[in-house]
Amino acid sequence: MDDRTLPPIAVAAPVLDGNERQYVLECLDTTWISSGGRFIPLFEQAIAGASQTRFGVATNNGTTALHLALAAMGIGAGDEVIVPTLTYIASANAVRYCGATPVFVDCEAECFNLDPAQLEAKVTPRTKAIMPVHLYGHPVDMDPVLDLARRRGLKVIVDAAEALGALYRGRPVGALGDCATFSFFGNKVITTGEGGMVVTDDEALDKRMRFLRGQGMDPGRRYWHPEIGFNYRMTNVAAAIGLGQAERLDHHLEARRRIASWYAEALAPASNFIIRPIEKPWARHAYWMYTVTLGDAVRRSRDEIMKMMAARGIETRPVFYPVHQMPPYSDAVGPFPVADRVSAKGINLPTHGLLTRSDVERVAATLIECARD
Ligand SMILES: *Cc1c(COP(=O)(O)O)cnc(C)c1O
């Protein structure tokens, strides 16, 4: 197949087809472009509403949302937080920003999420919290995680950066645990350019996060800072984009589901050597990234296949390197065989709302062709 003349297909792209433009222009016209303005509380309420939580605290990115939540929960030096090794680096880094230690756990082989069966063995007297990550949009099996947390008196902070709109046993993933965080980076389910949020039902935690987000300023005394806080505020311009996106969340999620079903169909004939993602009966996948793994029958390396696809105009991404493989975390206590294998064999295929059925079929056909011989 010679498709070198066809337009390139990007792995991710934002879809800004709602009120984003109108709301941003309102920011410019009214000069409310900084961290005050009406769109910030509206966006916070929209995401809290979609998460079925009482509160949402917007931040300037998903990493600061994680750090803010951990800091507000009092995680600090000497504490341990259990984190899956197969995640984006931000999950582990946020724990380190607090002076605490991430303790890594391997993933299960079906959805590549933190394996609840391996959690208990990682708990020590220093363990303060568990951070499940809903990898690529498929929810973690949360009941055993929440059950262990209750039994052992641990906090649960959910990194839901990739899973806005995903459901666990019918409930939004943001509603589970003590709090959950989202990212609104340009390639996420919805975007604000850069942005993040923590959602929670805990009023005291909400208050504490707002305090720390704004440099730890005393709410009753301007420019009096009883503690060291951060500047993790979101701008009104970012929130304006976010509100436009959030108003059409269902539409964005439907587009991703449609794309996933097209991939499932187009890749079905290759199911003996290209393993498609699954959706557990108790889950609704957000399909942030449609992720396949190469079966043992495939002789070419994953990186070689990605290179070949790139030469045919198709951008893909390798599955994350497990955090324990990277230099700052090389003292992690393993082994992590599932994460190591999935990371070596996994590819994220283009997943975004601008893809047409023929785009998806072209990606699938190219992948099959590159993986076959
Ligand atoms: C995107 C992401 C984050 C946060 O990313 P930012 O780029 O800081 O918004 C955190 N955790 C995971 C798992 C992510 O995918």
Image: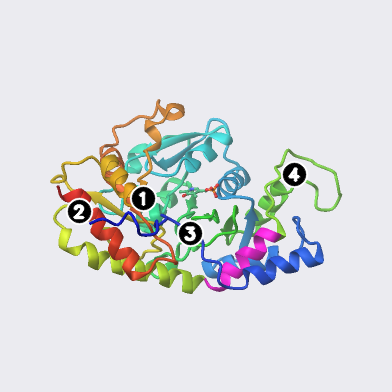
Q: CA distance from mark 2 to mark 1?
A: 15 Å
> Quick one: label 4, few (<14), some, or many (20+) residues within 10 Å?
some
| Residue at 46%, 47% in the rendered image | 131
> Quick one: label 1, few (<14), some, or many (20+) residues within 10 Å?
many
210 shown above or below 42:
above
**Residue 33 counted in the magenta span:** no
Q: Secondary structure at mark 4?
A: loop
What residue does disc 4 label? 215
| Residue at 25%, 40% in the rendered image | 341
In the picture provided, is 23 more to the left or to the right than 302?
A: right
What residue does disc 2 label? 369
In the rendered picture of this protein, how many numbered marks are placed on residues? 4
Badge 2 or badge 4: first in the primary sequence:
4
In the picture provided, is 224 more to the left or to the right than 86?
A: right
Q: CA distance from mark 2 to mark 4?
A: 54 Å
273 shown above or below 120:
below
Q: CA distance from mark 4 to mark 3?
A: 33 Å
Q: Nearer the viewer, mark 1 or mark 4?
A: 1
What residue does disc 3 label? 13
Disc number at residue 316? 1
Q: Secondary structure at mark 1?
A: loop
Q: Is mark 1 within 8 Å of ligand 1?
A: no
Q: Which residues are magenta?
A: 237-248
Majority secondary structure of magenta residues: helix
Say whether marks 2 and 1 touch (CB < 8 Å).
no
Say whether marks 4 and 3 touch (CB < 8 Å).
no
Name the amino acid, label 1: Thr
> Quick one: label 3, few (<14), some, or many (20+) residues within 10 Å?
some
Q: Nearer the viewer, mark 4 or mark 3?
A: 3
Badge 4 or badge 3: first in the primary sequence:
3
Position of the N terminus by quadrant: bottom left
| Residue at 79%, 67% in the rendered image | 29
